[in-house]
Amino acid sequence: MVMRMSTLFLRTLREDPVDAEVVSHKLLVRAGYVRRAAPGIYSWLPLGYRVLRKVEQIVREEMDAIGAQEVHFPALLPREPYEATNRWTEYGPNLFRVKDRKEGDYLLGPTHEEMFTLLVKDLYSSYKDLPLSLYQIQTKYRDEQRPRAGILRGREFVMKDSYSFDISDEAFKASYDAHRAAYIKIFDRLGLDYVIVAAMSGAMGGSASEEFLANAASGEDTYVRSPGGYAANVEAVVTPVPPPVPYDDAPEAHVEDTPDTPTIETLVGHLNERFPRVDRPWSAADTLKNVLVMLRHPDGTREPLAIGVPGDREIDEKRLTAQVEPATVEPFGDDDFRAHPLLAKGYIGPGVLGEKNASGIRFLVDPRVVDGTRWVTGADQAGRHVLDLVAGRDFTPDGTIEAAEVRAGDPAPDGSGPLELARGIEMGHIFQLGRKYSEALGLQVLDENGKLVTVTMGSYGVGVSRAVAAIVENSHDEQGIVWPREVSPADVHLVATGKDEAVFAAAGELADELERSGVTVLYDDRRGVSPGVKFKDSELVGVPTIVVVGRGLADGLVEVKDRRTGERTEIPLAEAVGHLR
Ligand code: ATP
Ligand code: MG
Ligand code: MG
Ligand code: MG
């Protein structure tokens, strides 16, 4: 069916919407693809919905190609499974929670690990059933703190999420690699300019993780890359540490300041000495907000120890003494440090409380026991490894770390040259969940020997609705959108100009013929609209090939214009279908 502009539910706008900051938001609203319904919540109009479905279809084809099977879960979900994995709490204010008429707790799914895990547990029981990959293309809900940039960051958005289930870590590797390869095909087909970077796994938990970022100045993610091919989200960068100074050889000042070995006892002792509490001595279980220390016991087990001032961002020795609440939170609750993103991400390793400085507090860190070196920000004057935690400044409220952590020109951790900073939009995220969800929800199968094994999982997301906007970020000019062919709402934008009905008749016939030969057409058949307005609209809407039927028709010619290059050629009307097919 030819889409005719005379009846198409479309009104283009000359002015940018007032609330729009980024170009994709401006253009998608102006060109009539989406309309805002509420902050971060958008309606899709006919052209926009066509593009969205094309993106979905590409994703679907590539997921099917690796043998993943499509399912569809509800978006309205019960609380219990999310309680079992602690995400009812961990997700914090980002979760849309709803009550039913009986006061029962529900949520609108931000992502579906729990539900997939439980479904597989319901139906599968043997290693023979694995491997398994399931996916859905579904509406997700997150009450984002800053819904901005239109559909780039919605509070309701479309995501493809898939989950892999394997009997072992080795088997998992194949599922991960298959997804990775499928993602490369997806983002290639979407025509995005993107990079694959090492990433942290965030609220999902788990270990190995990579992100697909579309290069864009408007992107909210900062990543580093080196000429030698190293690429990582700054959240995940392991900053190169200065040569380690063994504690035993550390300068005197250090020895005076800190205990020799940061065991839990010495740390607690140190806290009691430096920051005595008024009510009772510090114990390892003490927890407060903002500043965190992780302890590792000699046997390798880790234990969190948190210090800070609740509700107060300024760390101050006196206040610390005076305002410390005698709270030992057990079991750990909403505000507790275990839910703290920094800890969840494993940013905080063991350390020793050092001096406070103007803006926060400094930790002395033993490079031998720091869990990952990304937080060792350098050495102090005495050559000690130090870590500065500045309440509020080192991390944004959602736990992401500001780019200042890593500086342009720093050497890449793998030695592949100086780092360069760049911005990107997270388009896809693949990660190893390991057994976090299968353990919490009891997903086990029998192995060859009849022994119960906990299933190992992966989780893989694509921002489907976000992709529509990211493509526009990557592909537009002053006049409007320039769609890559695979996702364009039509193959050809056919414009009939003038008042001559013969022109409209010829154009109408061409449109029908094109459709019959498999070329989709958006036909501007509006009467009484000036050629100037029609051309402007065609450039704004962004179909890659524009065909003009007008004056040239008298000589049997039509004009073919390439939207991207602006190049125009005249061709005989009789050859148009063959040319455009
Ligand atoms: P971001 O860092 O941008 O907040 P995320 O890391 O929270 O994204 P994931 O949980 O990894 O997102 O979800 C998988 C994919 O879903 C992301 O890679 C992204 O493309 C998309 N996505 C996440 N949040 C949104 C959103 N608010 N609006 C649109 N797409 C989103
Ligand atoms: Mg997010
Ligand atoms: Mg992210
Ligand atoms: Mg992510």
Image (cartoon, helix red, strand yellow):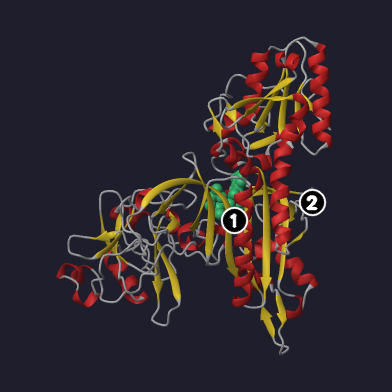
Residue occupying image coordinates x 29% and y 49%: 359
Residue 423 located left or right of residue 369:
right
Asked whether 279 or 390 is in front, the reply is: 390
Q: How many marks?
A: 2
What amino acid is found at the position of numbered circle 1 in the picture? Ile
- Disc 1 and disc 2: Cα gap in Å? 46 Å
Front label number (1 vs 2) = 1
Using the rendered view, name the quadrant where residue 68 is placed: bottom right
* Tag 1 residue: 184
Neighbor class of circle 1 (other Cα within 10 Å; few <14, some 14-19, many 20+) is some
**Can residue 126 be seen?**
no
Q: Is mark 2 within 8 Å of ligand 1?
A: no
User: Dot 2 surroundings within 10 Å: few (below 14), some, or many (20 or more)?
Assistant: few
- Residue 571 to residue 231: above or below: above
Instruction: Indicate the secondary structure of the residue bearing disc 1.
Output: helix
Q: In this view, which residue lies farthest toward the left? A: 252
Instruction: Using the rendered view, name the quadrant where residue 105 is placed.
Output: bottom right
Image height of 74 relative to 272, above or below:
above
Question: Ligand 1 within 8 A of label 1's CB?
Answer: no
Q: Is residue 430 visible?
A: yes
For the point 59% across and 24% down, the residue is: 17
Q: Which residue is mark 2?
A: 102
Mark 1 vs 2: CB contact within 8 A: no
Q: Secondary structure at mark 2?
A: loop
- Residue nearest the observer in this picture, 159 or 337: 159
Circle on res. 20: none
Which amino acid, by three-letter code, is at mark 2?
Lys
Q: What x and y, as percent, mark residue 99?
A: 73, 49
User: In the figure, 192 relative to 492: above or below?
Assistant: below
Viewport quadrant of the C terminus: top right
Residue at 50% over, 50% down: 398
